[in-house]
Image (tube, rainbow, N blue to C red):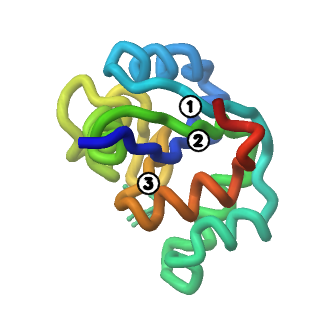
Amino acid sequence: MALERTFAIVKPDAVKDGHIGEILSAIEQGGLKIVGLKLTRLTADICKGFYHEHVGKGFYPELEAFMTEGPVALMVLEGENAILRWRDLMGATDPAKAAEGTLRKRFGASIGRNATHGSDKPESAAFEVSYFFNAFEQV
Ligand code: IDP
């Protein structure tokens, strides 16, 4: 399979708890390459654009409040089958259902506050990478 790129976020809970380093380490040890990286804060408008598929759902206000509460680390990851491999490293959306050793199991507290984000399919990855990173910000 050809190299694939995916988009990742260390969410505000994991940044606040001091887990950026461990998460970057898990990415590299998992064989994925970090080809884009920045720290920022999401505004409500940026969050709405990013999570446009979820705007209007019951949990969206909680999701927006969470994602805008503090700094986030944004990344572009590269590797063979990177989208699925990053989802596997993260584990299930709900940390209670995530496999032992996965990042959401290790660092997530609830289905809402679940430490990391990863694109779920190629179309989302293409949209999400380009939403936050221009060509000069990816090596
Ligand atoms: P994913 O992040 O595993 O792809 P999605 O279903 O796309 O999961 O949901 C996006 C994000 O919205 C989740 O990671 C989580 O932070 C939040 N979320 C999803 N479902 C709920 C819920 O039922 N309550 C609160 N937050 C939720």
- Residue drawn at x 58%, y 41% as measured from the top left: 11
Numbered circles on residues, count = 3
Q: Label 1 to label 2, Cα distance in Å?
A: 6 Å
Is label 2 in a helix, a strand or a loop? loop
Whether 62 is drawn above or below 110: the answer is below
* Helix, strand or loop for disc 3: loop
Please tell me the numbered disc located at residue 5: none
- Three-letter amino acid code at the position of disc 2: Lys
Task: Name the amino acid type tagged 3.
Answer: Ser
Distance from label 3 to label 2 (Cα)? Answer: 14 Å
**Label located before the other in sequence (3 or 1):** 1
Above or below 92: residue 43: below
Q: Which of marks 2 and 3 precedes in the sequence?
A: 2
Secondary structure type for disc 1: helix
Circle 3 is placed at which residue position? 119
Residue 113: % across, % down = 49, 47
**Residue drawn at point x = 76 percent, y = 53 percent:** 42
In this figure, which residue is indicated by the disc labeled 1? 14
5 left or right, relative to 40? left
Residue placed at 58% from the left, 22% from the top? 20
Tag nearer the camera, 3 or 2: 3
Instruction: Place residue 88 in its image quadrant.
Output: top left
- Which of these two is toward me, 116 or 123? 123
Task: Determine which residue is flagged by label 2.
Answer: 11
Q: Quadrant of residue 64?
A: bottom right
Q: Report crowding for label 1: few under 14, some 14 to 19, many 20 or more residues within 10 A (C-alpha).
A: many
Vertical arrangement, residue 96 with respect to residue 125, above or below: above
